[in-house]
Image (spheres, rainbow, N blue to C red):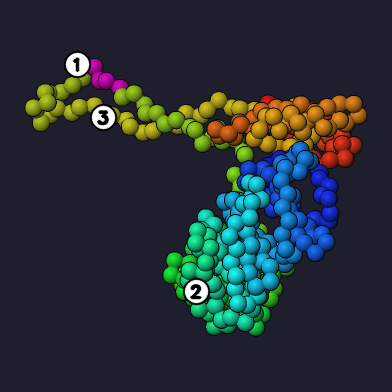
């Protein structure tokens, strides 16, 4: 996933891995002549900014903050900085590396070794294995909690369970029955783990490692957890002011007695709240828009618009607000019907989506 929009790039040789970076740049890796070559580009420009040549590697992973890439080679790890592909100090082990996963901050790297009953914890600053996690057996795959609190490890010799490891203590928390798939197990919202058990998906409480709920038949679906606000405007119905009726004041001659008199009866105040209906807002349809990109940079949006031409027409860039964020859309339209908008999108031979514009 990259915020740079539509683009394409032909590397000097076949690409094997792609590592998008938080700043929009991309590191591409491919094997060539017994070595692994790295190319750094900044889409949508197809110029290679930096290159690096590494020994033949078997797998790679980037830190969540995006400042380093780690690769496994023989019985060790090698790493490069992602901003310029400069090599950094590697780590040598006595056994082949089978899996590795960094913490979200990238300060530690958890490494599983072939035939070793545990994990080695590599400190990125010293470049050495600073700690170990003891496990019942060797691990073959690792998955990190996005918050950096737990690791899920797949036992190398079992296919029906997983281990939960607490990062704060570097200790095994327990074992959970689960299949291991491309999408599951996965860390889910509300401090839960979603695991696959046959045809079902079970949510397990991270605190107690007990089953919390089951989605019958959920194992037939592909699961991916993400946060999404939808960029939807706030409903006017949520902003309805509350007012109170002004209390009526009784004429002076209707008051019996004085405040010190027991017969004094002050007028009652009506404090019943009254809801004032906001004026009706009627969304008037304008037509169907063809959108090719939605990015945070106006320059990127204009560059993307300059590369698109549909039947002699070029899209325009329109800014829209989502809270305090300005989003720049590359659009064509409006069109009277969705069918017409779909035809324009297909004629562009680019990725697009259709939405209805209202005013």
Considering only order in the chain, which callout, 3 or 1, is on the residue closer to the N terminus? 1
- Front label number (2 vs 1): 2
Q: CA distance from mark 2 to mark 3?
A: 75 Å
Quadrant holding the C terminus = top right
Residue 132 circle label: 2
Q: Are marks 2 and 3 in contact (CB under 8 Å)?
A: no
- Residue drawn at x 74%, y 29% is 302
Q: Are marks 1 and 3 in contact (CB under 8 Å)?
A: no
Residues 171 and 47: in front is 47
Q: CA distance from mark 2 to mark 1?
A: 90 Å
- Residue drawn at x 80%, y 55% is 15
Tell me if mark 1 has few (under 14), some (14-19) or many (20+) residues whose alpha carbon lies within 10 angstroms of its own: few
> Dot 1: what SS?
helix
Q: Which residue is mark 3?
A: 268
Residue 221, quarter of the rendered image: bottom right
Q: CA distance from mark 1 to mark 3?
A: 16 Å
Visible residue check, residue 160: no
- Residue drawn at x 88%, y 40% is 349
Instruction: Name the dominant secondary structure of the magenta segment.
Output: loop
- Front label number (1 vs 3): 3
Classify 88 as above or below 333.
below
Q: Residue 307 placed where, x, y %?
A: 82, 32
> Dot 3: what SS?
loop
Tell me if mark 3 has few (under 14), some (14-19) or many (20+) residues whose alpha carbon lies within 10 angstroms of its own: few
Tell me if mark 2 has few (under 14), some (14-19) or many (20+) residues whose alpha carbon lies within 10 angstroms of its own: some
Q: Residue 157 placed where, x, y %?
A: 65, 83
Q: Which residue is mark 1?
A: 253
- Residue drawn at x 83%, y 56% is 14
Classify 108 as above or below 259.
below
- Which region is colored magenta? 248-252
> Dot 2: what SS?
strand
């Amino acid at each position: 996933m990259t915020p740079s929009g539509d683009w394409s790039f032909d590397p000097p040789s076949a690409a094997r891995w792609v590592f998008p970076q938080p700043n929009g740049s991309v590191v591409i890796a491919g094997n060539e002549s017994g070595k692994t070559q790295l190319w750094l580009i900044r889409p949508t420009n197809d110029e290679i900014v930096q290159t690096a040549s590494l020994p033949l590697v078997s797998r790679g992973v980037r830190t969540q903050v995006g400042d380093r890439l780690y690769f496994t080679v023989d019985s060790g790890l090698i790493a490069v900085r992602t901003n310029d592909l400069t090599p950094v100090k590697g780590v040598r082990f006595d056994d082949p590396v089978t899996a590795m996963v960094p913490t979200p901050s990238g300060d530690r790297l958890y490494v599983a070794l072939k035939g070793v009953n545990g994990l080695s914890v590599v400190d990125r600053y010293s470049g050495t294995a600073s700690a170990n996690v003891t496990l019942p057996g060797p691990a073959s795959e690792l998955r990190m909690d996005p918050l950096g609190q737990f690791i899920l490890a797949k036992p190398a010799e079992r296919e029906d369970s997983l281990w939960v490891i607490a990062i704060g203590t570097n200790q095994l928390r327990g074992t959970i029955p689960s299949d291991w798939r491309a999408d599951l197990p996965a860390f889910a919202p509300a401090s839960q783990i979603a695991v696959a058990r046959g045809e079902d998906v079970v949510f397990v409480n991270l605190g107690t490692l007990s089953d919390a709920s089951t989605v019958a038949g959920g194992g037939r679906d592909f699961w991916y957890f993400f946060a999404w606000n939808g960029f939807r405007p706030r409903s006017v119905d949520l902003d309805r002011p509350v007012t109170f009726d002004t209390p009526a004041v009784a004429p002076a001659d209707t008051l019996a007695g004085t405040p010190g008199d027991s017969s004094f009866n002050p007028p009652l105040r009506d404090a019943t709240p009254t809801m004032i209906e906001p004026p009706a807002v009627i969304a008037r349809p304008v037509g169907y828009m063809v959108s090719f990109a939605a990015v945070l940079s106006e320059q990127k949006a204009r560059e993307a618009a300059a590369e698109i031409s549909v039947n002699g027409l070029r899209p325009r860039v329109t800014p829209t607000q989502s809270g305090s964020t300005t989003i720049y859309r590359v659009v064509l339209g409006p069109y009277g019907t969705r069918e017409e908008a779909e035809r324009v999108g297909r004629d562009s031979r680019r990725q697009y989506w259709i939405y209805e514009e209202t005013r």
